[in-house]
Amino acid sequence: MGAQHGINPCHAIADPCLPAHLADAAQVTNIAGKLVAAELLASHISNIIIRSHGTKSRLDRSLRFLLSPLMASTSQITSIPNLITIARIVAIPLIAWLVILADPGLRLLALVLFVLAAASDWIDGYLARKWNQISPLGRMLDPIADKLLVGVMLVVLAYDHTLSALDLIPACTILFREIFISGLREFLGNTKIVLPVSKLAKWKTTTQLVAIAILLLVTTLPALDLIGTALIWLAGLLTLWTGIQYFRASWPHLSGETQ
């Protein structure tokens, strides 16, 4: 049938039509080609593994560069007081998100979480002192957590108009003071000068937290609006006064009078 249709059987099936020595040569060539291809593939895979190993080594070196040897010990991070402080920081975006959703039920949940976060400010300090787990990491994180909690919540309350335009005055005063004093402490830290936290400053923080908690409850109990407004103004005044106290205490170091 193939001949009738003009098809050469030797073209359809090549090997049977070739002489024996040519067929053996073609088979050897085919096997050699496959071996070369396999060798090239193995070489390519080897190069990929080498490059991957080199990249991993570079990553390992970069991690060793980023993390100091002292951080290999996680005792500070895993201590319960510091874990409580870290949890307070992590909870702040969640609390803010629940308030922004503008749902009464979620706002009450945000209030509960805020109260727990505010209470943890006292709990972590108490446990650190009781268990003798006071650490530089904790002393650094604790005031940052407080400032983040207050600052973020003031911005959120301004966003959802819980704070009136007039209430933005004490709110901005609080934000300005916290940023200013943080910068002042950082500057004095380079000169090994420490500004201790005053008792009035602790009352200032407490007033801020109570005022924010009441303002979160205003949508459920509108009668508390006047109390929340009065407390946020009181917190603003205390914040301003403690800022002035810190600035006055640091002035000799800023003016060079102590040199």
Image (tube, grey):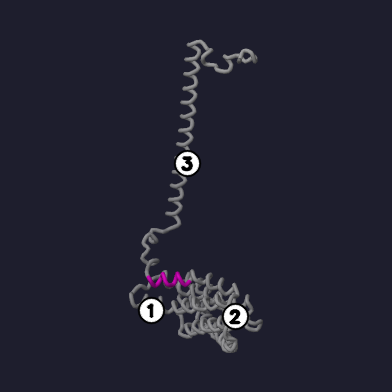
Secondary structure of the residue carrying numbered label 1: helix
- Which residue is tagged 2? 171
Residue at x-position 52% and y-position 75%: 149
Quick one: label 1, few (<14), some, or many (20+) residues within 10 Å? some
Prevailing secondary structure class for the magenta stretch in the rendered image: helix
Quick one: label 2, few (<14), some, or many (20+) residues within 10 Å? many
Q: Is residue 67 above or below residue 193?
A: above
Residue at x-position 47% and y-position 46%: 55
Residue at x-position 47% and y-position 76%: 117
Q: What is the number of the mark on residue 126?
A: 1
Q: Is residue 63 above or below residue 147?
A: above
Q: Is residue 203 magenta?
A: no
- Which residue is tagged 3? 51
Q: Which residues are magenta?
A: 80-88
Mark found first going from the N terminus, 1 or 2: 1
Q: What amino acid does circle 3 point to?
A: Arg
In percent of width and height, residue 12 lies at 58, 18
In percent of width and height, residue 206 lies at 49, 83
Q: Is residue 63 above or below residue 7?
A: below
Most foreground residue, 141 or 28: 28
In percent of width and height, residue 3 lies at 62, 13
Secondary structure of the residue carrying numbered label 2: helix
